Image (cartoon, grey):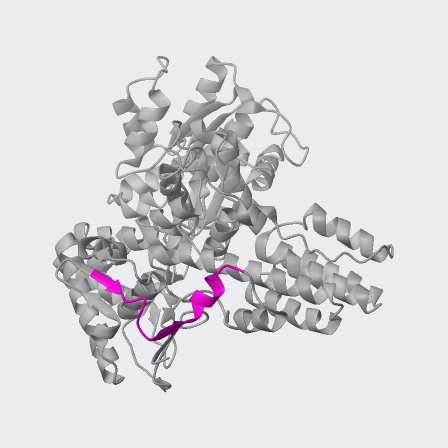
């Protein structure tokens, strides 16, 4: 073949057996898409919008013209006539399926009967890894899953043939290959167990089953299926060897072509879960019980600290508060604090006027108090004001305690510009929970971890934060699975098999990912088919990566002026590790590194705050990093 195109495991071109360079990633993506859909005629405007969904129509078409020129130039440089392969007009573009070319994915996707095990081996050898690794265009998500599914099917056919013919060593070899390239498929572990049993090695049967347990838990947060568990019991009992691996039925499940079923969205998007969303809040049950336990043990002040996007607000608003209000046993069997359903509750965010916000909340619907204006003055002048007020309110309403939740405490430093008001707010909070006063107030604060230094400027606040904090980390695989599936099950929505695992792979281990995950799930739900959230819906939504890219483009183009855009570019450059003969990756940098000279600091801090608020950058106590490397790639 004059032109050979490798898309599996890496992008690689050869022209007449010599390497052919196509250095632009958009050009590689475009050629890959056209080749995978050879013979299909694409209208330019649809092709442009598919490749550059966030760009304006005119810009997308301009990008398409440029990239088509790059592809044509590359083909010509390889002593090929570009018009033998590309059919281009002012209106349409297509890859000529009658041209002299070879595409690795075509053989993997081909149907029909396969002549022999040797033919199957040649086909599965083509799968050297997932389709276009490192590419996160919307269309690659669905195509990647389609090719992975084809690889599963071909591998299943090969291994069943090897097992039926008793080629145990070959079955072991190809089973290990399957596991290495395809996210620990259970059928591969089943093949290994059968092969070891065929060789009479019961010890390796047990060892392989243990590998399966560990791999599924590590990679997917799952237990082995009943089929795998039954096979293991069958093999160790010495029963007749099975010859069928049991290719999972869910991999061939058809999704009905119907319109979206009506219903209420089960996901919140970029917004936090509030008290009224408790029924949709899943995955943090154990942590909720732990926080409630700390309050039950008598803590009157509790700081819930974590990185941006770690779910602090949702945890307190939709997890802790409803748990306290219900008063029923928690997931660990413990009970919330005594009489917590009858506690008085006030939830505030400091904003630019923290004393006004506090006074308005406390005085609302409380005729026994003076006006909010007088209360603000009292708060300014006397740090014991909140304590006295809480005591009077609890006595008047026969309540044991007053629970004050101060969400997004960092606003006290980012929005409030008056130091006297900030100090008065802090002093009133700390006095109200002073154990020497034995008051009825419990204060729960959510704080972004990168604001430790701001709190440290206030000695008593620093001491209390050090003593009464709960630092929340990322969710485990099982917690993420609950957060994904729980809201859908509550609303009687369904996932196409394989989609949840795909989303878990996309989001696992990424800092600040929870709002982005919820946003991608909401957009997937909006594109549902009937009551099913499908792989296609997820791909069309842009996936977690696309959600990040769309947010970045919107913030950059519409949320920043020219000066701020230049600052944003500098921030992202400092958070990018340039690769030598390797893709660029994100770089963790000290926050101080992003804040240069004193005269530029306010403007840089303002831009950084916008990037953090948009979940594009994640900050901790000392460090900052981009939320996902897709921001760099795209």
Is residue 318 shown to the viewer in this render?
yes
Q: For the point 34% across and 81% down, which residue is it?
A: 2
Q: Quadrant of the N terminus?
A: bottom left
Q: Is residue 292 left or right of residue 608?
A: right
Q: For the point 37% across and 64% down, which residue is it?
A: 135
Kindly indicate the quadrant of the structure image that contains residue 210: bottom right
Q: Nearer the viewer, residue 458 or 604?
A: 604
Above/below status of 420 relative to 368: below
Kindly indicate the quadrant of the structure image that contains residue 605: bottom left
Q: Write down the region rendered in magenta.
A: 93-112
Q: Position of residue 353 (x, y in %)?
A: 26, 36
Q: Is residue 475 left or right of residue 266?
A: right
Q: Position of residue 93 (x, y in %)?
A: 21, 62
Q: How many marks?
A: 0
Q: Position of residue 82 (x, y in %)?
A: 22, 75
Q: Nearer the viewer, residue 102 or 486?
A: 102
Q: Quadrant of the C terminus?
A: bottom left
Q: Does residue 24 show up magenta in the picture?
A: no
Q: Nearer the viewer, residue 555 or 313?
A: 555
Kindly indicate the quadrant of the structure image that contains residue 376: top left
Q: Nearer the viewer, residue 144 or 580?
A: 144
Q: For the point 25% across and 57% down, which residue is it?
A: 41
Is residue 632 shown to the viewer in this render?
no
Above/below status of 23 relative to 376: below
Taking the view exactly as shown, the residue that stands out farthest to the right is 238
Q: Does residue 97 show up magenta in the picture?
A: yes
Q: Is residue 149 left or right of residue 537?
A: right
Q: Position of residue 418 (x, y in %)?
A: 24, 43
């Amino acid at each position: 073949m004059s032109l050979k195109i490798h898309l599996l495991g890496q992008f690689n071109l050869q022209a007449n057996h010599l390497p052919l360079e196509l250095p632009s990633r958009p050009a590689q993506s475009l050629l890959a898409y056209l080749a995978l859909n050879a013979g299909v005629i694409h209208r330019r405007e649809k092709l442009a919008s598919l490749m550059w969904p966030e760009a304006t129509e005119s810009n997308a078409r301009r990008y398409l013209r440029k990239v088509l020129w790059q592809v044509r130039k590359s083909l010509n440089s390889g002593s090929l006539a570009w018009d033998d392969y590309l059919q281009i007009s002012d209106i349409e573009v297509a890859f000529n399926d009658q041209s002299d070319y070879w595409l690795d994915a075509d053989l993997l996707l081909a149907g029909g009967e396969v002549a022999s095990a040797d033919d199957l081996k040649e086909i599965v050898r083509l799968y050297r890894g997932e389709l276009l690794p490192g590419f996160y265009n919307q269309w690659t998500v669905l195509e990647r899953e389609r090719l992975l599914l084809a690889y599963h099917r071909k591998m299943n056919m090969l291994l069943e043939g090897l097992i039926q013919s008793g080629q145990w060593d070959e079955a072991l070899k190809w089973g290990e290959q399957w596991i290495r390239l395809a996210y620990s498929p259970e059928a591969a572990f089943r093949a290994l167990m059968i092969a070891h049993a065929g060789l009479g090695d019961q010890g390796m049967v047990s060892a392989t089953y243990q590998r399966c347990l560990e791999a599924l838990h590590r990679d997917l947060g799952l237990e082995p299926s009943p089929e795998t568990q039954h096979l293991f019991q069958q093999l160790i009992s010495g029963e007749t060897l099975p010859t069928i691996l049991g290719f999972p039925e869910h991999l061939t499940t058809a999704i009905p072509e119907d319109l979206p079923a009506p219903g209420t969205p089960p996901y919140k998007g970029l917004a936090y879960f509030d008290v009224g969303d408790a029924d949709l809040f899943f995955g943090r049950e154990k942590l909720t019980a732990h926080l409630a336990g700390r309050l039950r043990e008598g803590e009157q002040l509790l700081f819930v600290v974590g990185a941006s996007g770690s779910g602090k607000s949702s945890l307190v608003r939709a997890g802790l508060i409803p748990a306290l209000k219900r008063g029923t046993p928690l997931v660990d069997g413990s009970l919330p604090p005594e009489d917590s359903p009858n506690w008085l509750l006030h939830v505030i965010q400091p904003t630019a006027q923290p004393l006004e916000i506090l006074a308005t909340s406390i005085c609302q619907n409380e005729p026994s108090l003076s006006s909010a204006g007088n209360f603000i003055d009292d708060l300014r002048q006397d740090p014991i004001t909140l304590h006295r007020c809480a005591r009077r309110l609890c006595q008047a309403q026969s309540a044991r305690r007053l629970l004050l939740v101060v969400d997004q405490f960092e606003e006290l430093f980012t929005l409030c510009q008056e130091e006297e008001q900030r100090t008065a707010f802090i002093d009133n909070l700390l006095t109200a929970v002073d154990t020497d006063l034995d008051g009825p107030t419990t204060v729960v604060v959510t704080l972004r971890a990168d604001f430790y230094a701001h709190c440290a400027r206030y000695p008593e606040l620093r001491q209390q934060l050090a003593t009464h904090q709960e630092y929340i980390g990322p969710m485990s695989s099982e917690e993420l699975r609950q957060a994904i599936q729980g809201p859908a099950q509550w609303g009687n929505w369904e996932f196409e098999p394989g989609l949840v695992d795909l989303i878990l792979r996309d989001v696992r281990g990424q800092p600040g990912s929870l709002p982005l995950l919820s946003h991608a799930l909401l957009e997937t739900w909006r594109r549902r088919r009937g009551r099913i959230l499908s792989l296609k819906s997820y791909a069309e939504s842009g996936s977690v990566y696309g959600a990040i890219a769309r947010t970045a483009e919107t913030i950059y183009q519409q949320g920043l002026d020219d000066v701020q855009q230049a600052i944003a570019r500098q921030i992202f450059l400092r958070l990018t590790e340039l690769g030598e003969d390797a893709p660029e990756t994100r770089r963790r940098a000290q926050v101080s590194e992003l804040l240069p000279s004193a005269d530029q600091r306010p403007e840089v801090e303002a831009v950084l705050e916008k990037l953090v608020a948009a979940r594009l950058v994640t900050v901790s106590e000392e460090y900052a990093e981009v939320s996902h490397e897709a921001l760099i790639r795209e």
